[in-house]
Image (tube, coloured by chain):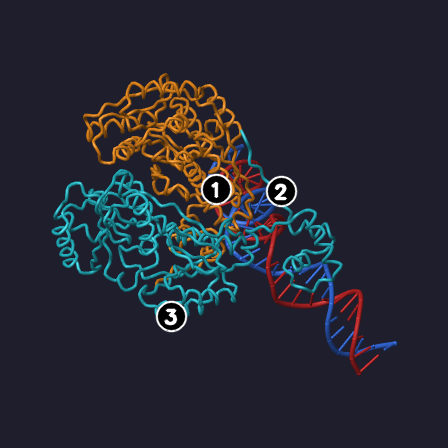
Chain colours: A cyan, B orange, C blue, D red
Amino acid sequence: MSIFARVEKVTINDIARLTGLSKGTVDRVLHNRGEVSKKSYEKVMAVIREKGYEPNLYASLLANKKHRVIAIVLPHPEPGSYWDLAVSGIEKATEEERQFGIETTLYTYDEFRADSFREVCAQVLQSQPSGVVIAPIFQYETQVFVQELGTRQIPYVFVDTKLDSPAGHLAFYGIPTYKSGYLCADMLLQGEKVREVLVVRIMRDKERQSDPTILRRAGFLDYMRENNPGCTIRSIFVSPTDAAATDEALSAFFAEFPGVRHLVMFNSRIHLIVPYLERYPIPGMRVIGFDNLGANIKALENGTVSMLIAQHPEKQVQKAIHTLSEYMVFQRKPEVADNHMHMDLLTRYNVEDY
Amino acid sequence: MSIFARVEKVTINDIARLTGLSKGTVDRVLHNRGEVSKKSYEKVMAVIREKGYEPNLYASLLANKKHRVIAIVLPHPEPGSYWDLAVSGIEKATEEERQFGIETTLYTYDEFRADSFREVCAQVLQSQPSGVVIAPIFQYETQVFVQELGTRQIPYVFVDTKLDSPAGHLAFYGIPTYKSGYLCADMLLQGEKVREVLVVRIMRDKERQSDPTILRRAGFLDYMRENNPGCTIRSIFVSPTDAAATDEALSAFFAEFPGVRHLVMFNSRIHLIVPYLERYPIPGMRVIGFDNLGANIKALENGTVSMLIAQHPEKQVQKAIHTLSEYMVFQRKPEVADNHMHMDLLTRYNVEDY
DNA sequence: CTAATTTCCGTTACCGGGCACGGAAAAATT
DNA sequence: AATTTTTCCGTGCCCGGTAACGGAAATTAG
């Protein structure tokens, strides 16, 4: 049986009494507001050093009545999409942090247009937030943005991806993307030797693949090279919007390579190929995708998708907001800045409980 | 771009002004402290309904200065054991809730002795806690205990297991144990048809198997019956303390059934058989166990154990404490009482990040 | 040696709620 | 009708910190 004990607090009044000064003066010392003689200053500091002083947060916040705003910068959350998941995390965190006088404002940009991102960044700066959460898709533009945040002393946290360059970010929440590809390969093969694998990719990726997708693919390929070298990895490209074209591409592929029984996608869009697979079921097909989108989970429950590797953007954003809040309210920094969060393996038997 | 706006707060003084009463009376209404005429009561309630009132947390906590204690009742956390994991969750939650004037006291009992549990319960009652977290190993004794808590109006939360009988618990945090056995079977077979499986059990279980283990085994067996009916399931019993005897038992088993390549344990002690498997490695052996104990994780990283199904008791306890705190401080009940938490699938490729 | 500044510090009124105390008004008792 | 009891409500102080205000003491200027 062990006890986690309480510590008795020293108040500003105690200090005033002990120094023979008034609490007004003590407050001036504590906040470096000047108008204090050297002698008085030293007297106060001596007591603080000896007794230790921690301000009462409630009293402080009560007297202060500050409203701080956290700006959150994400790609547009299209309904049912990856970034849409993040929104629920924002809502939850907003709810939780409101008690500390913290509000959130969501700014979203087009993840395919850097100018859209720049514009939003300008808006954020103008709004003078007390803290910022950023999902940095555009490396260079983000670099510029956070530099400005740095000079303005505004703390910021990255989610999903982080900047390569050493940055002054308060924290980062994301998953180890490269490793997620590795993991994906391991889950796909299940220890077997496999001769052919199909990687389905998104049309747009041909032009501008997103960093996470590239990294993940690299992890996947490295695993293959190391553990299943004889395997042929075939790719096809499908459209994120044109379902008919997607079906056609899949149909053409399986006409040519009917023996393929292993399929993966490295983005969150595995649900795109589900209609085809449900129309033309292939016995023994193992399908692995990423992220807990509603459509993906449904396919998992149906058995069309075998496994999802989920990174839970909602939790990442929630943690990011919480970290900023803790920092702004309590001046507490996270123990470690760069937090690789857990990758959840979801199967039909453990999705239900998230 | 969407905004989560702030709502202007209605204070107790606003209500007093609007009703023409004093804040003392308003306060009496808010806390149901009586001594208020029906007319005044209705006036206040009407304004509250219309304007909505949320008490200012800081002011409340500042004025209150209450110290409430949450008692936590668990089996002894032997170092490196399952319950030891829970302790880290207690520490974290204690840290988090301290700001609300909440302290925790841990009471532990011998999970194999009901009298030990009873004794601890008596201690808890005597300490007059404001809330209780219980891991109920002994059904009957727990029943008696929570009944007393009920009459004393002390809220309580279950972790790990919950009582069968309909109880007045504030919440429950655990995993769906039956389903965890099902999941375990699915992960063990990986879609293959398997002819033989070894289930390693703990000696003590022979006499008094714990509920979770029984349920989990039932889930496992049901999956086997449904999906892999031809399979022979063999059991051996090992000692939790006598390593030599364990090795001997395993050695005898594999001498008799050298073809077995699938092994599971339904408790958290898969680490017990690791030394044997590392001394006499069996190629292609698939080993699945439960829970993220340090020793289990090490074996997972080494590759001796293929997969762990983790239920993260630390998170369960943390949530339990948080729920109690929210209830005691804000009078907020959880949306759903019975929370089945996620079962994490851990492999060597995703353990690192928990 | 006065008058005008500075420097420094105490006083005081919040912030929003909690709650003890005491007293006015209403109801019950004699 | 006078008194006691009960019901109901307002006042005022406290929690710990913040900060404006104004005034005494120390300095400087004239």
A349 displayed left or right of B23: left
* Location of mark 2 (residue): A8
Picture layout, residue B326 above or below residue A250: above
Task: Tell me how far mark 1 sits from mark 3, CA to CA.
Answer: 55 Å
Task: Tell me how far mark 3 sits from mark 2, CA to CA.
Answer: 50 Å
What kind of element bears circle 3?
helix
Measured as percent of width and height from the top left, residue B14 is found at 47, 57
Image quadrant in which the C terminus of chain B is located: top left
Asked which quadrant contains residue B265, the reply is top left
| Chain assignment, label 2 | A
Picture layout, residue B257 above or below residue B189: above
Discs 1 and 3 share one subunit: no
What kind of element bears circle 2?
loop
Kind of residue sitting beneath label 2: Glu
Image quadrant in which the N terminus of chain B is located: bottom left
| Chain assignment, label 3 | A
In the rendered structure, find residue A119 and report the number of the disc placed on it: 3
Q: Which residue is drawn at 16% across and 48% down?
A: A277
A63 displayed left or right of A226: right
Discs 3 and 2 share one subunit: yes
